[in-house]
Image (spheres, rainbow, N blue to C red):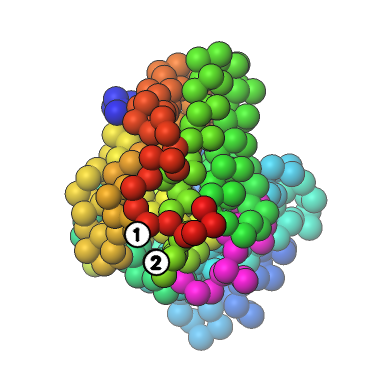
Amino acid sequence: MSDAVGLPAPTALLEEFSVEDVDEVVKSKLPEGAMIRSANAHGASFWTRTARLDVVLLDGSERAYFLKVAKDDVGKGMLTGEYESATLLHSFSPNGLPEPVAFGTYASDPNSHFYLCVFIDMALRIPDPAKFCAVLAEMHQNSMDHSPEGKYGFHVPTYQGNMPQNNSWTDTWEEYYVRGLKDFIKQEQAVQGRSEELEELLVPFFKKVVPRLLRPLEWGETKIKPCLLHGDIWYGNIAERTGTKEPIMFDPAAFWAHNEYELGSFRVPRYKLGRQWLEEYHKHFPVSEPQKDVHDRNLIYSIHTHFCASTLYPNDKSIRQQAIADIRYLVEKYPDGLDGYEGERPEEV
């Protein structure tokens, strides 16, 4: 359904960074008595300054930390969301993400905010699909049954790039999905302008397609349970640990959701993953019922990525067309919505 569109990994001119740039609040979050030996710009980001801090501990041993700094309210929201996401995700997958340390605001500049985590030496290449998908599936499975009151959402907003996600709690997965996608579409239209073609397709999409593909997930004994997702899996947010080549993920934008939603980016060529990743994942986490819908669920779960990318890359007009093509395909395939569902359903439906 989607044509390949290459999107760059985060790149930015690295600003100089030195020990003098490390605020006292950041220093207070390091182990007691630690001394910063060096602080150097490290990595790349669209919206933050990033640095590696090399620290000497009281016992003479050395440890490295990774620091992100962002400005203004959006920057504060981004880093708050990342810290809260990483803290909870790390509890379910201690080896899957760098260990978070702290979030805070500079004492020297109340408009500067930071996220601090343990530094992981990593090779920025796509990890082995089998290894990565095993780690991802285990994280999802470990988190199941831990969502507050079995709800969908998250306790703070998180961000896709610099796009906020409304993570207010919902009782059903369908409600969370619809609200989130509508919000991304609204943000995309603010950048790209309105599209009559898109708006016409969205009426049957939300009225017919979404209930047909998502509502049966919450019926009967096979009803799905929320899992905690990383929330932004693509080649720019995954890597290999140097030496061991074990997979690592970073820059999370977490929320509680249907686990298969995490896999929407796997089918989109610009994210450089692919069908093999889906197959590897489902070796560890079985396909949800109804299984016959899995491919179209994966398609519907990929659509938000087009609106995010279309917002973040406003000069690429082809990305919206991919979204329109995918939505049109689903609208044409499911004109009857739930009335066309042939499986078992609760009596009240």
Residues at marks 2 and 1 touching, judged by CB atoms closer than 8 Å: yes
Residues 132 and 56: in front is 132
Q: Which mark is residue 222?
A: 2
Cα separation between marks 2 and 1: 8 Å
Residue lying farthest to the bottom in this orientation: 59
- Residue placed at 45% from the left, 42% from the top? 338
Number of residues whose C-alpha sits closer than 10 Å to that of mark 1, classed few (under 14), some (14–19) or many (20 or more): some
- Residue placed at 55% from the left, 13% from the top? 196
- Closer to us: mark 2 or mark 1? 2
Q: Which residues are magenta?
A: 144-158
- Residue placed at 53% from the left, 49% from the top? 174
Quick one: SS at disc 1? loop
Q: Quadrant of residue 195?
A: top right
Q: Main secondary structure of the magenta part?
A: loop
The amino acid beneath tag 1 is Ser
The residue at which mark 1 appears reads as: 288
